[in-house]
Image (cartoon, rainbow, N blue to C red):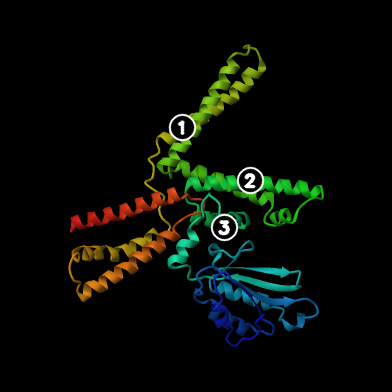
Amino acid sequence: MAAFESGLAGEIRRVNAGEAEEFDLAGYTESRVDTLISAAFGAPLPATDMVKITFVVGAGKLARQKYDANLQKWVCAALRNLGFQEDKGASCMIDCAGTYKSQHDTGKNIMTVIIFPNVEGPSGEEAKEGEEGADGGGGAAAASAQEMAVTASMDMFPRMIASKCPAWSQKKRLVKILQDFIQALGEVQAALVAGAATEQQLALYDLATPEDVQAKVEWLTGAMKEQVEAGQLVAAEKRTLQAQVEVKLEALGEELAKLEELPEGDPKRAKRGEKLATQKAALEGRQELLAGVQPLTHHPLKREPQIREVWRRYEPLLQVAEGARGRMLTLAETRALGEKEDLEAEISRLEGESRGWFESDEEFETRLAVAREFRRNSANRGKKKR
């Protein structure tokens, strides 16, 4: 652990992406804490991904005298002054940037404040590689996304979903993942009762409780319903939902036909018939709702506003490139084409950062194609007005 004030802020700011470092604040006064927090976290760290910074702010009986009794309070107050928020469920993920939590490390018998600072974020190929694979098809990124969804606090969860799972189809896939996790936890509980739980099962059990995960399933289900009622669906999602309703109505019709075969005085016929009629009315209402939905062309890219800003600088350079075909370039044209390549790389980076969780390659490429076409059409309309 580092325990020196001299250069400590610089040491913190040099922590590499994905790393976790621990620093001992023994002997720190309130003014030293304020100075350190401001210097270390006053601006985003230059890391390309989240880092985890742990401050030791207290200890057990043998080392307690090294720490001021108010040290933890001072650290948290200084962080709040910079806009940090406390989140007991925060973890080392980019969506937890600007949060902190206090924790008692019982293994080491120390009190800590764990900080997930604001960072500058990924760039270039790092962003593209980091987003690839975070779909429903498996792989390390998908597994990481699943773990983040399971372990996130309910305070963080809605913000995470808005950022990473904006589409109805993404939410639906996540619901299935969480339901499978709840089932797996049930199997772990059974193994615990039988005294046969493996280390792998115990590690799974440490991630979250069934109640916590079920709360997320219920929240997601509600969010999906609101999304349908608001018509926030693309054409493929609308077709999927309409097909689901049709299948349910067909099954319901078959069950109603069987009831008709029962004698009129049979109590089952009346009771069950009333229930099925209510279900049918609800499904027909949903069918009518879906019929009136005007599908979105695409779910907007997360970084679309930034991409449009870059595109405004990029679009005129396309004309320069077109006009320079087949001849020697002037110095100004050479510089312009160099800038064009830089802007293309920037657009590619921002597009990569826009990929969501549990989104297939086909879905993402479709979103990109529609967004690109929309930008080109907007540029052409602008030319005609001029």
State the residue lying farthest toward the bottom. Answer: 6
Q: CA distance from mark 2 to mark 3?
A: 18 Å
Q: Position of residue 304 (x, y in %)?
A: 38, 58
Residue at 44%, 32% in the rendered image: 288
Q: Position of residue 335 (x, y in %)?
A: 26, 74
Asked if residue 218 shows in the view, the reply is no
Q: Which residue is mark 1?
A: 287
Q: Which residue is mark 3?
A: 140
Mark 2 vs 1: CB contact within 8 A: no
Asked whether, in this view, residue 176 is left or right of residue 125, the answer is right
Mark 3 vs 1: CB contact within 8 A: no
Question: In the image, what residue type sits under mark 1?
Answer: Gln
Question: In the image, what residue type sits under mark 2?
Answer: Asp
Q: SS of the residue at dot 1?
A: helix
Q: SS of the residue at dot 3?
A: helix
Disc 1: CA contacts within 10 A as few (<14), some (14-19) or many (>=20) = some
Q: Is 39 above or below relative to 133?
A: below
Q: Which residue is mark 2?
A: 180
Frontmost residue, 23 versus 100: 23
